[in-house]
Image (spheres, helix red, strand yellow):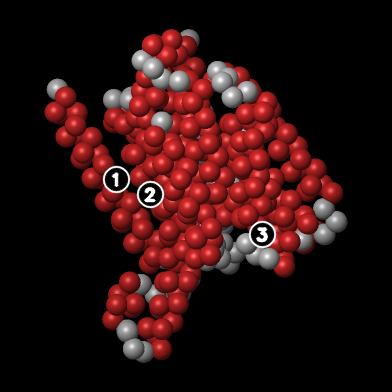
Amino acid sequence: MTGRVEISYAWLLTGLIGLVLAAFVLSLSVGPAPVGLGTLLSAHDSQLGETAAIIFFEIRLPRALLGLAIGASLGLAGAALQGLLRNPLAEPGIIGISGCAALGAVAVFYSGLAVTYPLALPLGGLSGALLAVLLLYGLAGRDTGVTTLILAGIALSALAGALTALALSLSPNPFALTEIVFWLLGSLADRSMAHVALAMPFILVGCALLFAAGRGLDGLSLGEETARSLGIGIGRLGLLVVLGTALAVGASVAVSGAIGFVGLVVPHLIRPLVGHRPARLLLPSALGGGALLLVADSLVRLIGSGQEMKLGVVTALLGAPFFLALILSYRRRVL
């Protein structure tokens, strides 16, 4: 039985890796300019080849890399948080990280720094995410239980949302207000390799911390008392997951804006395929999240006419019906 599960898990990973590669190639091939991979490979020395290289390496490649990294971090963080909270409805926004990262970026918009220094925007988002971790553990305490941690996160998320709304309502410049609202909707358009270089180290460190929590999440699925008897520190496990989420999701929000539902939908789709084991869910959720966001971003460019649709809107349109169906499913089980 064990061997059969391992083989099926290996096939699952193989299929997801293939899906990610296909989605990545699709992301590189889609855009308003009629340039494909064949154009880049066949026209090396011509002016067309130079144009194709600029489109690929300065416009599409950063967008594809960010789509893969951000989708993976959202899917991974969602799976880890659902394991930590033992709640299938948990997702990265529940502990206030996304809201505080958005608030940090909005503060940069509001101050005008985004105009004079473009990288101030993602730096502001990262600062907001890291500040959220300090506030979260200041409110909940270092060795707190999971329930207290979540209550503190909900309070922090509500505060960040209120302060963001206040900044929007007090904005003296209507053009800045429009730009802030559009950024909050989430997008990967006009991102460069500078954004990739800024966000990627934080995303990689955050994802490493989340993967390191896998064994503890498996133990916690048996109950807190059993986990403690196995030598798993609940406080340390919570710190790993929250800090990993803050770094990975905070950096993602800082460069892309708010993109919802990926961390909720992907773990739910994959969980039945891994035997409902939290540790086994982490890597497939990361791969699935990367593939989903790459495909969604490609759809944004394919269906857009004139002004490009925002990526956060597309993921919300895909995720909201799934979320409602999930709630109805749980309601039927309870009744």
What kind of element bears circle 1?
A: helix
Task: Name the residue carrying label 1.
Answer: 16
Q: Secondary structure at mark 3?
A: helix
Quickly name the residue at label 3. 120
Foreground: 66 or 184? 66
Placement of 307 over or under 124, stated as above or below: below
* Label 1 packing within 10 angstroms: few (<14), some (14-19), many (20+): many
In the rendered view, does 28 fall on the left or right side of 120?
Answer: left
Instruction: Give the distance between the C-alpha atoms of the residues marked 2 and 3, in whole angstroms.
Output: 29 Å
Which label sits on residue 291? Answer: 2
- Which is nearer the eye, 187 or 77? 77
Image location of residue 22, percent across then percent down: 31, 56
The residue at the point 37 percent across, 19 percent down is 219
Answer yes or no: is residue 299 visible.
no
* Up/down of 169 relative to 113, above or below: above
Instruction: Say which residue appears at 66% left-offset and 59% top-offset.
Output: 120
Q: N-terminal of the two: label 1 or label 2?
A: 1
Residues at marks 1 and 3, CA–CA distance in whole angstroms: 35 Å
Is 73 on the left-hand or right-hand side of 17?
A: right
